[in-house]
Image (cartoon, grey):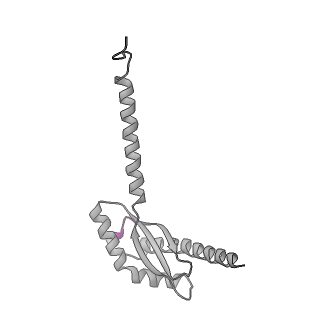
Amino acid sequence: MNQEVGTMSFNRAHRLAEEMKKEISQIFREEIKDPRVGFASITRVEVSSDLRYARVFVSVLGSTEERRQAITAIKKAGGFIRSELARRIRLRYMPELNFHLDESIEYGVRIANIIKEQVKGTSAETETGSGGSQDGES
């Protein structure tokens, strides 16, 4: 029985997280006028099991400085975003929002570029390197 209650709260937190992700994305597109938030998108939302706190992960295109400015602008708009969410999603208590810069996309691109460079290096060595003569053996 106790495990069933835990599963129900997880499912509710997960459903709420998905709904919050959708609504916050829409708020970013339609309500926030700050140009620093222009290239920001919500990658995921994690809601605590007691539905009191939500970690919102934001990915921002641009330089390091542009990402820093965007997350600062988003944090400043946090109260507005939370009140808009409360208006759109009916809950007794809207979770406190904590915004975090999500660098997983940039990390993935960086890893893909490293792999691509390694593959290029390996194929270049194969073409120019070991083409027949074996040094040191007769």
121, above or below 21, in the image? above
- Residue lying at the far bottom of the rendered structure: 92
Q: Position of residue 24 (x, y in %)?
A: 47, 74
85, above or below 113, in the image? below
Residue beneath the point at 41% across and 47% down: 112
106, above or below 69, in the image? above
Q: Is residue 38 magenta?
A: yes
Residue beneath the point at 34% across and 79% down: 76
Q: Position of residue 62 (x, y in %)?
A: 32, 60
- Which of these two is toward me, 29 or 108? 108
- Residue lying at the far front of the rendered structure: 137
Image quarter of residue 81: bottom left
Using the rendered image of the protein, determine whether residue 33 is visible from the camera's viewpoint: no
The span picked out in magenta is 36-40
Residue beneath the point at 70% across and 76% down: 4
Q: Position of residue 100 (x, y in %)?
A: 40, 70
Using the rendered image of the protein, determine whether residue 7 is visible from the camera's viewpoint: yes
Image quarter of residue 58: bottom left
